[in-house]
Image (cartoon, grey):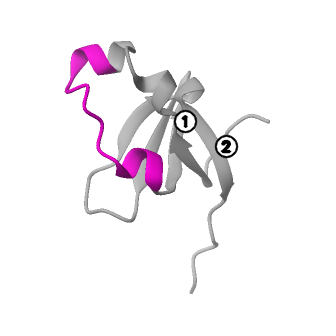
Amino acid sequence: MPIKKGVLVRAVREKLDNSIEALASDPLWPPYLFETDGEVLDLRGDYAFIKFGAVPTPPIWLRLDQLVEVGAAAPAEG
């Protein structure tokens, strides 16, 4: 099932290790990428813009093949 906007995802360590993203930055990934859920905010080509809400960090772009879907985000109240 393809990843869509609004779903919750986690990064897959095996897919991130030794990737071009790892070569372009610190290869020691922060644990929250693998231990907390992130919401897909936007999609562009093979990439998803993800906000990990459990930590105060800016959203990041990751390739879709580096992600696994864990569920749907709760609808906004209001």
Horizontally, is 24 left or right of 52 in the view? left
Label 1 near label 2: C-beta < 8 Å?
yes
Residues drawn in magenta: 22-35
Q: SS of the residue at dot 1?
A: strand
Q: Looking at the image, which residue is at 43% across and 25% down? A: 16
Q: Earlier in the sequence, mark 2 or mark 1?
A: 2
User: Residue 40 at x, y = what percent?
Assistant: 53, 48
Does residue 31 show up magenta in the picture?
A: yes
Does residue 7 show up magenta in the picture?
A: no
Badge 2 amino acid: Lys
Residue 66 is tagged as none
Residue picked out by circle 1: 43
Q: Looking at the image, which residue is at 67% across and 39% down? A: 3
User: Residue 22 at x, y = what percent?
Assistant: 30, 20
Q: Quadrant of residue 45?
A: top right
Residue 4 is tagged as 2
Which residue reaches farthest right? 1
User: Residue 12 at x, y = what percent?
Assistant: 52, 34
Which residue reaches farthest bottom? 78
Horizontally, is 70 left or right of 30 in the view? right
User: Residue 52 at x, y = what percent?
Assistant: 40, 55
Badge 1 amino acid: Leu
Q: SS of the residue at dot 2?
A: loop
Horizontally, is 44 left or right of 3 in the view? left
Q: Viewer-proximal residue, 70 or 72? A: 70
Which residue reaches farthest left? 26
